[in-house]
Amino acid sequence: MISRVIFAGISTVIVFSPFVLVGGSMLVVTCFQLLVLFCLGFYFFNVENDKLVLKRTFLDCYIFLYFIFACFSFIFSKTPYNTRNELFNLAIYIALFYLTLFFIDESKPQKQYLQVKNLISLIIGVGVVISFIGIGQFIKGEPVNVMMMNSNILAGYLIMIIPLLMSRLILILKNHKFFESYPNLSSLKSLLNNIRFFFSFGSENLLLISYFVFLVIMIVCLTFTFSLGAWIGLSFGLSLFLFLGLKGNFDKKFWYVIMGGGLLLIYLVVYKLVYLDIVFNRLNWWRGAWKMICNYSFTGVGLGCFGSVYLKYKTGYLNSLYAHNYFLQIAAEIGVAGLVVFLFMLTSFFKNGIKQILNYKNVNNDKSVLSNAEQVKKEEISSQGIFLNMGILSGLAAILIQNVFDYNLYIPANAILFWVLLGVSCSLQNNFNYGKIFLKNVSKWWWKIVLMVLVINFVIIIGKPLLASRYYVLGEFFLEEKEFKEAEISFKKAIKLNPLWAYAYWGLARSYLDYNQKKKAQSLPPLSEKNDEGYSNFLPISKEEIQLKLVEAIIELKTAIRYDECNSFFYYQLACLYQMQGENKECEKAIKKAISYHFHKAEYHKFLADFYKKEGVNNEAQREYLLAERLLREYK
């Protein structure tokens, strides 16, 4: 019962995440987080035989340290709101990793294989649906991205699935003795005879034909994305797949030919990349990320804060929320130590998986030493698990190589699939030789009360940002309708629910400022608006009251800067408010701060030039005017 509920939860996340989790909707993200929390709570709440089993893997220490470094980055985060959101996402990914381990029953090899096969079949089905949609978009002349951010994100999702599909296809061929009939290249007398055999064999088993067609559809969709990084990643992934397959029954020469073709494809793609402008854009992004890493080597700028800080370090014309290199972005956001832990985790994972596969003796060579039919069946199931794990390792290798050039693993849909496959592979690799933790007496009433309290608190923590976003949207609506008092109330409610959200403070500052401007207009003699008695509906207000609202707006904007200290726009707006207040020194400091965080913004230099002109500093004013003109020409 427990495994079924967890499998249903994981399946729901996998099926819907590629379609709804890429837009960044707070409502959708919160729903998925609550779903994973429900599955986790259900596992801990429903215990058997008065004890709870927690499975251990060889990655536990690395995952724990990686999450600790991510949490540590929150202390030094430049934008705590972004870091908190990304920490929530990372916690959900790790929870999915362990939920995958929990629902797979490694004590029964046949059941374990069926559970893994069903999950992989589901993932393949999602990939096929996405590929159909992508091909349809190409036919219509639309960008091939399904519902994802861009084609590279879609391509990254597909290259994790294609090796899985190949492993399933090979298993079907093995089960029907295809490799025994064609053990090497010399046995393939002619391509025509091989094709005839394939289709005559497929007419008896539609599953083989279906998987072959699915593979073609995915490759066609991947081709239409025109993602060079994905092809490089897939080439490495397939090379790993074929290298691990050298232990199989195919002639080694056959595998070497395909591996050579894969390496040639990589060379051609890299050669073509040299002539694309996208290479220079990525080099500029990487250069900016490297400068950021040098300045924040130990603490990082905070998980999810790269885009906020990048404007200070950018060297090219383009802005970016991502470094277009997942590993550089990890180092920039949580520090070099966090990246080292992550790389050690990956190294340990692939080392353990590849070692298991290469050391495995094929069942066809060991039948003579097997004592009974049951042991033969067990070895056959293990062999099938090995092939599935080959596909998983190859798919994960492909996405990691692509993330040298992209940021797919920062997108929830891709990250969810990555961590789920990581959990599946760990369940196939060592059968939990690292042991289990048994918690006894967990069916007592006090355990359930404590668990319910924890779950309720987590629900509140997850739900508060969603409610805050609702009030923020309501506040923006009231601002557009010029209902400034209602906007003020809404923004204050958003701040109470989510005190880390800098833009809520900015919204509150605008409500004060716009209210101030409205009162200024109302304090003038009315032109046409009069009530039935001929008197104005509004009473004049004092300059002191107007000045008080301006001070309150400045205070709220300063608070917004405290929670988003690299936001150059906030400093620019603060400079405007200081100018209205007549605080010239503070105005100069604020606009210089804005320029330091976004030097290439011509508007900021023009503002500073106007300020210098009013102050009579003509030389500085002329220099800033010239700089603003040059930036306008360069960054059209």
Image (tube, grey):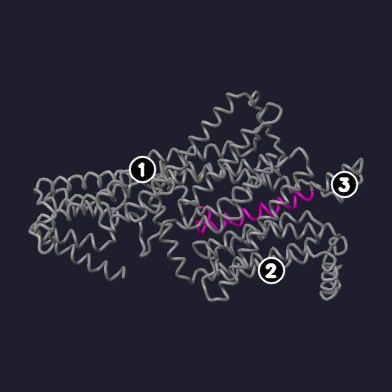
Q: Is residue 63 left or right of residue 535?
A: right
Judge whether residue 392 is colored magenta: yes
- Residue 210 vs residue 399, the one in the foreground: 210
Closer to the N terminus: mark 3 or mark 1? 3
| Element marked by disc 2 | helix
Q: Disc 3 or disc 1, which is closer to the eye?
A: 1
Few, some or many residues within 10 Å of mark 1 (<14, 14–19, 20+): many
**Residue 397, how many percent across, how many down?**
62, 54
Q: Position of residue 325 (x, y in %)?
A: 49, 56
Is 503 in front, or is 616?
Answer: 503
Marks 2/1: CA–CA distance: 48 Å
Question: Under tag 1, what secondary structure?
Answer: loop
The amino acid marked with disc number 2 is Val
State which region is magenta: 383-409
Is 509 situated left or right of 541 in this image?
right
Between the residue at mark 3 and the residue at mark 1, the CA separation in whole angstroms equals 62 Å
Q: Is residue 432 left or right of residue 384?
A: left
Q: Residue placed at 47% from the left, 66% from the top?
A: 279
Residue 206: image location, x then y, percent: 80, 65
Q: Callout 3: helix, strand or loop? A: helix
Question: Majority secondary structure of the magenta segment?
Answer: helix
Between label 2 and label 3, give the one nearer the viewer. Answer: 2
> Which residue matches tag 3?
366
Residue at image mark 1: 500
Q: Quadrant of the N terminus?
A: top right
Q: CA distance from mark 2 to mark 3?
A: 35 Å
- The residue singled out by tag 2 in the image is 216
Identify the mark nearer the N-term, 2 or 1: 2
Instruction: Tell which of 88 and 598 is nearer to you.
Output: 88
Looking at the rendered image, the quarter that the C terminus falls into is bottom left
Q: Residue 350: horizontal and vertical position, in percent?
A: 64, 47
